[in-house]
Image: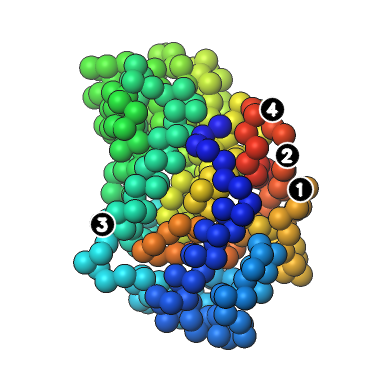
Amino acid sequence: MSGAALSEEQRLALLQRELKWAEEKTEFYRAAFARAGMSTAAVLSFEEMARLPFWENAAKEGADAPFFMLTLPLSSVLRMSVLHDTAETGRIHCYTQGDVARQVQTAADLLAAYGVNRASTVLLAGDFTDSRTLDLQYALDRIGAAVLPCTGRTAADLLRAAVPDTVIAWEYELPAIAEAMGDLSLNRLITIGTHPAPQKFAREMAQRMGARHRHIFTLAQMGALIGGSCSTGDGIHLEERLFFAEVVDDAGASSRADGARGELVLSALTAEAMPVLRYRTGLSVRFVRGGCGCGDARLRIIEE
């Protein structure tokens, strides 16, 4: 679907480098790994990730220190953003130039796979203080699409001047976007949300407007777009250039196998400024590996 697939060996090398970077650069991870009685040098396979502690168990120590995971001085940070998934207090996330470049590239690959191109006119609705919305803006700039940036409240003003063929919107913006668009038809609707499966309102809106619907999954804790749906409409394909995924069962046992069920656990593979390792998402999912009807060989994550 989007971007060149990495081999298992390449992804393991990225993971080992990320673990070493986190251990060397932050007291937070050094202490967490020491309590687990291991060094990241002992992680020689994906399966050995299960020996590392879960992120949220140890993160309580740094709850009052927003930069407790920062690996670099602030002078090396390109972007600092408060990320919100809900109305609750946001999470500060920092990014290096390399972080932003990788995230924009993967976002551009994803949107291009969805058919967005230089001829597209895109209404992009969201919070532009959120780094993930900025990544989408810069991805569209890279593609060369005409962009109408807005929030749900300001969409009507732009729609009086131009009619988009594509809407990219956070799910919380959709009711206002739907009202502003009225009876307009739409070529494609790309929604962004905190679950691998889109909300019912998003599916109904796409059907009502005659639009092809794709969905992008993200979580504030991970700081980036995690993956996107495909033409099969069943789950999302993980962005394996940025993330490693596993599931854990009720006893805490980890698996990556085809058909594995449990709570989704995510780790960053390439984050420089703020690596997040083994974050328990609270989402119940199933892994599907092997052939997908869309032709994408990457891991598919289906919410249950």
Q: Quadrant of the N terminus?
A: top right
- Tag 2–tag 3 contact (CB < 8 Å): no
Q: Which residue is mark 4?
A: 293
Q: Is residue 270 above or below residue 124?
A: below
What residue appears at the point 69 percent right and 58 percent down from the top-left corner?
247
- Tag 1–tag 2 contact (CB < 8 Å): yes
What residue appears at the point 39 percent right and 75 percent down from the top-left corner?
25
Report crowding for label 4: few under 14, some 14 to 19, many 20 or more residues within 10 A (C-alpha). few
Whether residue 292 is visible to the viewer of this picture, yes or no, is yes
What's the residue type where badge 3 is placed? Leu
The numbered dot on residue 78 is: 3
Between the residue at mark 2 and the residue at mark 3, the CA separation in whole angstroms equals: 38 Å
* Secondary element at tag 1: loop
What's the residue type where badge 4 is placed? Gly
| Among the two numbered marks 1 and 3 on one chain, the one whose residue lies closer to the N terminus | 3
Report crowding for label 3: few under 14, some 14 to 19, many 20 or more residues within 10 A (C-alpha). some
Q: Nearer the viewer, residue 49 or 153?
A: 49
Image coordinates of residue 250 in percent, x first then y, are: 75, 66
What's the residue type where badge 2 is placed? Gly
Q: Nearer the viewer, residue 115 or 298?
A: 298
Front of the two marks 2 and 4: 2
